[in-house]
């Protein structure tokens, strides 16, 4: 197989392999590296594959490459990153559909607690819906061992108390309300839109804020008399959930510059969780580099 043929055959699987690596690692940036590593390993071993088995072979290489990385992390907590919906939409209709419950940040955080092989088995069986025999073959396991790993993974996942969100009402209206409250520094409006026990995290910081009362110091920093400045927000979406890109105009500055990305988990018509990331993914989301004053 020459290089041009190899590139043409493998390129069509790039996005789904990227999503697969992302699920295993929880990191958008690491997924980039691992897809490249997958294609490098595949090129070196290209004589081993049949055209009709290419996709499964690439998944095997990608999974093993990711497992190598996970094992090398040892006890270091992974740095979860968001995944732009515009890139998820690149998956073709004949590829696996990406449902919210299989890509949302809460699910990814939960499966990061699993040992590497259990994580891989859970994703192959319960997310990608591969048969037990194919999963076992991919991971060089017996079917019995693969099924046992799946049961242990499911039990661990249940113990985390993770459940898929069940959004109700108009999520876009709720997102618009959150944006309005932020831009107008209206804390009372914000509080009406969130659950009392809201959870706010700021990866990669391990610090977590639980409940509205714990957020009061953040309100003072962002919106107080000597606050950070003026805010503008744009709606977007990542991990199949609503998000808002925040731009900040500090005192004395002319334009609004990228500052953070808030990803919202909504349940029962209220915001139940917010993951706040820095602005490094604004380019991947197709967001402006700066906003002018109105």
Image (cartoon, rainbow, N blue to C red):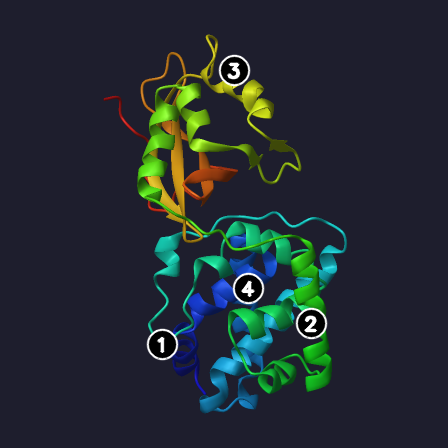
Residue 94's mark? 1
| 2 or 1: mark nearer the eye | 2
- Nearer to us in this view, 155 or 28: 155
Q: Position of residue 57 (x, y in %)?
A: 54, 82
Of residues 168 and 110, the one drawn nearer to the viewer in this rendering: 168
Please say if the residues under marks 2 and 3 sit with CB atoms less than 8 Å apart: no
Q: Residue at x 65, y 83 (%)?
A: 136
Q: Nearer the viewer, mark 1 or mark 4?
A: 1
The C terminus is located in which quarter? top left
Which residue: 57% across, 73% down? 124
Give me the C-alpha separation between circle 1 and circle 4. Answer: 19 Å
2 or 1: tag closer to the N-terminus: 1
**Which residue does the numbered mark 4 point to in the structure image?**
21
Q: Earlier in the sequence, mark 1 or mark 4?
A: 4
Find residue 263 and report its horizontal and vertical position in percent: 46, 41
Q: Which residue is pictured at 66% across the width and 37% down the height?
A: 206
Q: Earlier in the sequence, mark 4 or mark 2?
A: 4
When the figure is inspected, residue 48 is found, relative to residue 197, above or below; the finding is below
Nearest to N terminus: mark 2 or mark 3: 2
Secondary structure of the residue carrying tag 3 is: helix
Residue 199 in the image, given as x and y percentages of width and height: 57, 36
């Amino acid at each position: 197989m020459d290089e041009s043929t190899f590139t043409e055959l493998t390129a069509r699987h790039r996005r789904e392999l990227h999503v697969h690596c992302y699920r295993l690692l929880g990191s958008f940036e690491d997924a980039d590296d691992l897809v490249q590593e997958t294609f490098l390993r595949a090129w070196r071993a290209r004589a081993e594959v049949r055209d009709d088995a290419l996709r499964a072979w690439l998944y095997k290489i990608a999974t093993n490459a990711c497992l190598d990385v996970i094992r090398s992390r040892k006890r270091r907590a992974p740095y979860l990153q968001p995944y732009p919906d515009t890139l998820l939409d690149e998956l073709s209709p004949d590829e696996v559909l990406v449902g919210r419950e299989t890509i949302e940040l809460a699910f990814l955080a939960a499966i990061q607690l699993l040992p590497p092989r259990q994580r891989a088995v859970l994703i192959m069986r319960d997310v990608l819906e591969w048969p037990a025999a194919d999963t076992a073959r991919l991971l060089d396991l017996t079917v019995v061992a693969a099924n046992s790993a799946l049961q242990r993974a499911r039990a661990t996942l249940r113990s985390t108390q993770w459940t898929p969100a069940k959004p109700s009402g108009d999520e876009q209206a709720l997102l618009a309300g959150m944006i309005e409250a932020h831009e107008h520094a209206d804390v009372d409006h914000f509080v009406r839109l969130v659950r009392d026990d809201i959870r706010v995290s700021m990866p990669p910081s391990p610090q977590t804020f639980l409940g509205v009362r714990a957020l009061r110091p953040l309100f003072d920093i962002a919106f107080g008399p000597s606050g950070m400045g003026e805010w503008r927000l744009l709606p977007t979406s990542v991990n199949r959930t609503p998000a808002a890109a925040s731009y900040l105009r500090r005192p004395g500055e002319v334009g609004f510059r990228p500052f953070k990305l808030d990803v919202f988990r909504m349940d029962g018509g209220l915001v139940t969780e917010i993951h706040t990331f820095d602005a490094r993914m604004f380019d991947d989301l197709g967001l402006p580099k700066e906003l002018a004053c109105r």
